Image (spheres, rainbow, N blue to C red):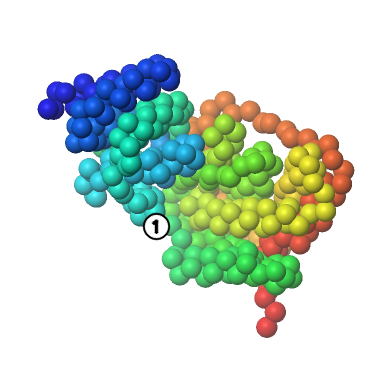
Amino acid sequence: MVDSVALLAARLTEAAALGDMAAALDRARSVAALGPEIASAAAESALGRAVELLWQRGWQPGEVVTAVSRPLTALATRAVAAQCARYPEPRLHPVWRTQLTELAAGPLLMGSIEKSLHQVVALIAELMALPQLPMLVPGPTDPAAATATAGVDRRVLARVRGLLAKAESTAFPAEAEALSAKAQELMSRYAFEQAVVTAAEPQEAAARRLWLRGPYLTPKAQLVDAVASANRCRTVFYPRLGCVGLVGHETDLEITDLLATSLLVQSTRALTHAAGSGRAYRHAFLVAYAHRVRQRLTEAGDQVRPRSTELVPVLAARQQAVDSTFTTLFPGVRTRRTTATDPAGWGAGIAAADLADLHPHRRVAG
């Protein structure tokens, strides 16, 4: 049975590689005819191999699920969970463990076996088409130790997340601004305090990826870059995948991730209440929003940065580490500019960004 399952798995993979719909249907029928037990084993073997190859190409479990097309998301979730369940937990990096807690396992083949196998072939084809990514953390097949940096104090993160959640849910812009401003203030202060504490230690940079939801991915990536730049991080945009690579000190990455995610929610909400419509208007709105956020964050940075020269050497060392890591991970990156053609959308985006919650020097009243 082992040989037959391996052969059937290879046939499913071959059908995916050929991209021939008729061949895929034919293979699905022939495998389904052998019964659910053999069909499930063949599907698990084929999908497991396709998924494991992605680990060697820099992908993480949650990213695989995010990158596939929506009709295949559920199957991808089950396939990733099934493959990762085969690894001893000590081999899984903490980033992997966190992502896997959000993925629900289940049987690979559900409903009609033939239809399910056709989905398996379609998913394998999509997985095979995913590009190489920089390896940000060790995968389960990597001999490197599954360790992580200390990161940000969990109590600080809990307070920040609570403030941003309230800012995103309130219907009152002034209240949202005060809440989000307090969150940025907490994180900025924490970042500079940690810089003082670790001044004598070697400065290292980390990296992560932030995935965006379409449409209008380019201006959304610009918004992420605005937040990242203000927090001493560098970015690279993957337009085909819809994600932004971030490089920075671990504390600065946490600030960027939290604030950028919140501002993406706020910009989307502001866009739904905007007066205009049409693709050009909405694109211009979001480009202007990102432009104005960048200006405001630059201004806000002057308010929170310590005036003492004590931090100059350590911040310079951190920036050098960020630049070095960025160059290693993303050699040959080119700068891309985006234009906006709708004046009304631009003006509305500027106005909405002026109400966004990001002033780190303002305090919550009372």
Instruction: State the residue at coordinates (83%, 53%).
Output: 275
- Percent position (x, y) of residue 32? 26, 29
Q: Quadrant of residue 22?
A: top left
Instruction: State the residue at coordinates (85%, 50%).
Output: 347
- Percent position (x, y) of residue 100? 35, 50
Quadrant assignment for the C terminus: bottom right
Which is nearer the eye, 11 or 316? 11
Tell me if residue 196 can be seen: no
Q: Name the residue furthest bottom.
A: 366
Identify whether 350 is placed above or below 359. Answer: above
Left or right of residue 45: residue 21 = right
Tag count in the figure?
1
- Percent position (x, y) of residue 139? 33, 39
Tell me if residue 258 can be seen: yes
Q: Secondary structure at mark 1?
A: loop
Quadrant assignment for the N terminus: top left
Q: Please name the residue that numbered disc 1 is placed on.
A: 150
- Percent position (x, y) of residue 241? 54, 34
Identify whether 279 is placed above or below 125. Answer: below
Identify whether 221 is placed above or below 314. Answer: above
Label 1 sits on what residue type?
Ala
Q: Name the residue furthest right.
A: 343
Left or right of residue 350: residue 99 = left
